[in-house]
Image (cartoon, rainbow, N blue to C red):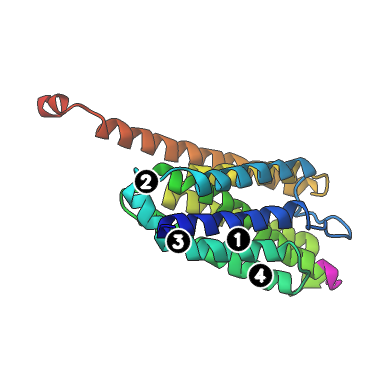
Amino acid sequence: MQPLTGLRFLNLVSFLFVLLARVVWYETPTGDSLAIMPASFIDAIFGVVYTTLLIWCIRPVQAYPADRTLIFDISGWFMLTMLGFGASSIIGPPWELVSTTISFISLCIIYIKIQHHPNRSPWMRSPFSVFLAWSSVQVLILPFRILQDFRFDDLFGLTATQWVSLMLLIFASGALCFVLIHADWVFGLVIIWYYIGLFFNERLNSLQQGLTIGIIIVLMIAIIIVFRKRDQLFSKEKRPISQESDS
């Protein structure tokens, strides 16, 4: 078995572990619903996450030298990410927080390596953009779940409602910077999907719903800006040489 084939097989096995952990072994947390939890229809995003990751694991890469190099570079981190994400679906708090953190850090390393790798195919980043965005959402929600389990009604003098409003703003600000800095419209769309779910979760007050709408509008504007920059770049790259000389 060639090294590349072996690594891809191990990547697929670790992905199947996550699939089993989330679909078969996962138990929905009990207790009162959190205001920061989106409506149930938002869980459809998991289908997108798993489908894009599966395609990434099995798609042919023999014709893409840069992608083959990347697979050698990130496969270890990919397996660590999958194992951590799968384990977090099985174990409970507080170890769930540790496992999720390890998985999230590994995923960030993968994204950075892909982002700075020259001559990669566009498909190398897109699955991890979706996965990183949704993992960011899970990292945002998890501390609220743990605090609820330990019966914390307030923290640092702020009530749960105030914390929700504050974290929605901080999270949106981080997502906005990420989209603009990395020109990653896929990441932005996933975050917008999350805020749409928040708007329809029937647990936000009127001020938080207005805040959610404003965040969605701002993120949409950022995505449009990124798209326009990409279109301008592509049109410049595809302009015939004769036209450039005439101008």
Amino acid type shown at disc 1: Met
Residue that badge 3 annotates: 74
Task: Give the residue displayed 40% in from the left and 34% down from the top.
Answer: 228
Measured in 3D between alpha carbons, the distance from the residue under mark 4 to the one under mark 1, in whole angstroms, is: 10 Å
Which residue range is magenta in the image?
A: 148-152
Measured in 3D between alpha carbons, the distance from the residue under mark 4 to the one under mark 3, in whole angstroms, is: 19 Å
Task: Give the residue displayed 38% in from the left and 50% down from the top.
Answer: 67
> Residue 62's spot in the image, x, y percent?
37, 46
- Whether residues under marks 4 and 1 lie with C-beta atoms below 8 angstroms apart, the answer is no
Measured in 3D between alpha carbons, the distance from the residue under mark 4 to the one under mark 2, in whole angstroms, is: 33 Å
Inspect the magenta stretch and tell me whether residue 126 lies in it: no
Residue 99 has which mark?
Answer: 4
Quick one: 230 or 112, which is closer to the camera?
112
Q: Nearer the viewer, mark 4 or mark 2?
A: 2
Instruction: Report whether 78 appears left or right of 194.
Output: left
Residue 82 has which mark?
Answer: 1
Amino acid type shown at disc 2: Gln
Nearest to N terminus: mark 2 or mark 1? 2
Q: Is residue 64 visible?
A: yes
> Residue 77's spot in the image, x, y percent?
50, 65
Residue that badge 2 annotates: 62
Main secondary structure found in the magenta portion = loop
Q: Which of marks 2 and 3 is in front?
A: 2
> Residue 57's spot in the image, x, y percent?
52, 49
Amino acid type shown at disc 3: Ile
Q: Quadrant of the C terminus?
A: top left
Quick one: 188 or 93, which is closer to the camera?
93
- Element at badge 2? loop
Nearest to N terminus: mark 4 or mark 2? 2
Instruction: Report whether 71 appears left or right of 153.
Output: left
Q: Which of marks 2 and 1 is in front?
A: 2
